[in-house]
Each structure stands twice: as structure tokens, then as C-alpha cells.
Image: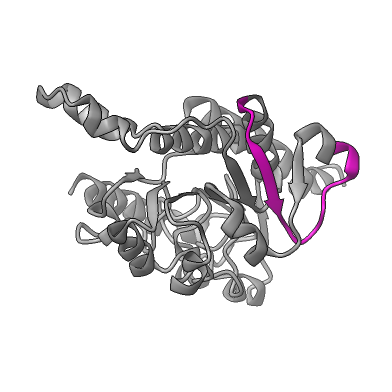
């Protein structure tokens, strides 16, 4: 209810002022989708700036038709997200959540936790996507002694690949069965929407752990819930849902062995400061040349 009230209040304020705005700065999904209707009513809009990664909350055809510039502050919270991914991997690998539940509920059953707890050392971790966040995650995983793999459209240069200690996998379907942990670091596009469906998940190891801080719509929602229930997925963690905000009845809220939260991985205090700081160069690149004419 608090979420709905907050979103309604922010959306109301946005409606009041959008007709006067030349620049609209948003974060992905919150506080409001930049719909075609909002773009139409923002008659003075020139720039749509996303303080974060991904502009799929903007109706891009409508923005293009209106002649608007769409930009992202893409590197602003990458450290926050990469650290969050590492945290979720460890939380799921070590079966931390049932242990925490025991601590606060007065239980004490070590065997009930340990039978599903594993070390990260020696495990194979694969990232689907090796952009800014993917590379940062691989850097942070290297000291754990993992076998690191990555799949991307483009291979990183040889020197960086050696520094990361990661091997390139050109064929995603060939990489997935090798991985104990799969991390998604890919954008949401028409090609990737629903990409990880029942068939793709079936290619993974039984007992795989999946971490997704990219976009919820990359996954088939029900296929994930079913695979968690059957045990094919041993743990699923992330902060992205489809749709967002997630309704109370969303199956990921109730599936076993999940480490889900609202969309918070990039919202640390440090990440917010970084986003705010990095907006200035984007605005300057758009408007400083005009001011100096």
C-alpha cells in the first residue's frame, strides 16, 4: 500500500509539471513509465535521461517520433549491482536464508541448513553478458577460486580476459550445462524477452543457482517458479521482476529457495550519489554548447 501511495504521489507531481519540463530524469521503472501519452503531454521535452541502466521503461518509438534525445547514465551504479550479485550468489550457495530464519524463529537445526550449503571455491560461474557489470562481477569472483566463464556477442580483448581469468563461451547453450551458477547481465530487447524459458532452463545443470539483476522479463516467470519447485533450480535470486512493481500474487514471492528483493541493487547511497554526480556531464554535453553560442 505504501508503494502504491508513493508511486501515485510522484506520478501526480509528474503530471503537474511535465508540460513545462525540458528534461525528464527518471530511473528504470520508478517513479513512472515514460509512456507515449506522457511524451505527448510533455510538449517542451527535449531530453529523456535515465539515471541508471536501461531505457525499456520509455516508449522509445514515441520518443523517436517526437524527436527527443534519449540518454542513460550507464556507469553510475555498476559497482552497486555487481556487489549485489556476488552477495546473492553467496547467500544462495551457503543456504543462508533458512539459517537466518532459524535464528529469528528460535530453531536450531544445523543439518537442515548444511545439506544444501556449498563452498563457492571450485564451482563454475558463468555470466551471460560481460559488459560493465559483468566484468566487475568477474573481477570480484576471481579471488574465490571459481572457474569463470562468460558469453557475449563480442569477446573481450585477450589481456583483459587473462586478467579476469575468464574463458569465453561463444555458444550459450554449450556454456549453460557447465555452470553451477548462472548470472544474467544482458539488456532486455525483443530478442532477449522471455529468452530463458522452460527449454533454456532445462539445458542447465540440475541444482543450478541463477542470479538475475538485469530484467525480469528476460525470464519466463512460471518456468522459473516451476523449476524452483521441482529442484532443478536450487536457488533463484535477483531484484528485477515482470511486471514491476510485482503484484502480491507474483509466483516468485512464494517459490522455494528464492533470494528476491524489490529493485534495489543499484540504489545504495553510494550508487545514488554516483548517479546524481554523473548526470551533470550528460546535461552539459546536451546544453553547454547551446549556452556558449
Whether residue 118 appears in this view of the structure is yes
Magenta extent = 144-160
Along the line of sight, the residue nearer the viewer: 35 or 227: 227
Q: Which percent across, then down, holds residue 21?
A: 54, 54
Q: Which percent across, then down, holds residue 77?
A: 59, 37
Q: Is residue 194 above or below residue 115?
A: below
Q: Residue 54 occupies which quadrant of the picture?
A: bottom right
Give the farthest residue toward the left. Answer: 106
The residue shown at (50%, 52%) is 28
Q: Residue 32 occupies which quadrant of the picture?
A: bottom left
The residue shown at (47%, 67%) is 202
Along the line of sight, the residue nearer the viewer: 227 or 152: 227
The residue shown at (46%, 71%) is 197
Q: Is residue 153 magenta?
A: yes
Q: Is residue 21 left or right of residue 167?
A: left
Whether residue 279 appears in this view of the structure is no
Along the line of sight, the residue nearer the viewer: 198 or 113: 113
Q: Is residue 270 magenta?
A: no
Q: Residue 80 occupies which quadrant of the picture?
A: top right
Amino acid at each position: 500500500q505504501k508503494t502504491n501511495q508513493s508511486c501515485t504521489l510522484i506520478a501526480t507531481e509528474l503530471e503537474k509539471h511535465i508540460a513545462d519540463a525540458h528534461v525528464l530524469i527518471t530511473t528504470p521503472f520508478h517513479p513512472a513509465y515514460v509512456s507515449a501519452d506522457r511524451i505527448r503531454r510533455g510538449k517542451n521535452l527535449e531530453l529523456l535521461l535515465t539515471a541508471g541502466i536501461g531505457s525499456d521503461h520509455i516508449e522509445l518509438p514515441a520518443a523517436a517520433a517526437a524527436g527527443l534525445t534519449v540518454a542513460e547514465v550507464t556507469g553510475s551504479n555498476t559497482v552497486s549491482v555487481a556487489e549485489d550479485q556476488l552477495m546473492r550468489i553467496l547467500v544462495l550457495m551457503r543456504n543462508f536464508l533458512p539459517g537466518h530464519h532459524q535464528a529469528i524463529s528460535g530453531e536450531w537445526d544445523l543439518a537442515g541448513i548444511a545439506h544444501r550449503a556449498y563452498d563457492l571455491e571450485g564451482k563454475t560461474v558463468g555470466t551471460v553478458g560481460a559488459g560493465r557489470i559483468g566484468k566487475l562481477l568477474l573481477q570480484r569472483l576471481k579471488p574465490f577460486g571459481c572457474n569463470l566463464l562468460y558469453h557475449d556477442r563480442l569477446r573481450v580483448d585477450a589481456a583483459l580476459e587473462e586478467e579476469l581469468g575468464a574463458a569465453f563461451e561463444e555458444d550459450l547453450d554449450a556454456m549453460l550445462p557447465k555452470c553451477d551458477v548462472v548470472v544474467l547481465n544482458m539488456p532486455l530487447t525483443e530478442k532477449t524477452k522471455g529468452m530463458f524459458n522452460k527449454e533454456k532452463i532445462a539445458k542447465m545443470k540440475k541444482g543450478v543457482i541463477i542470479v538475475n539483476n538485469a530484467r525480469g522479463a528476460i525470464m519466463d516467470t512460471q518456468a522459473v517458479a516451476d523449476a524452483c519447485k521441482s529442484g532443478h533450480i536450487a536457488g533463484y535470486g535477483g531484484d528485477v521482476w515482470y511486471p514491476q512493481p510485482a503484484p502480491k500474487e507474483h509466483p516468485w514471492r512464494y517459490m522455494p529457495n528464492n533470494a528476491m528483493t524489490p529493485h534495489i541493487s543499484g540504489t545504495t547511497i553510494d550508487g545514488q550519489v554516483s548517479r546524481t554526480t554523473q548526470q551533470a556531464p550528460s546535461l552539459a554535453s546536451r546544453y553547454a554548447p547551446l549556452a556558449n553560442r
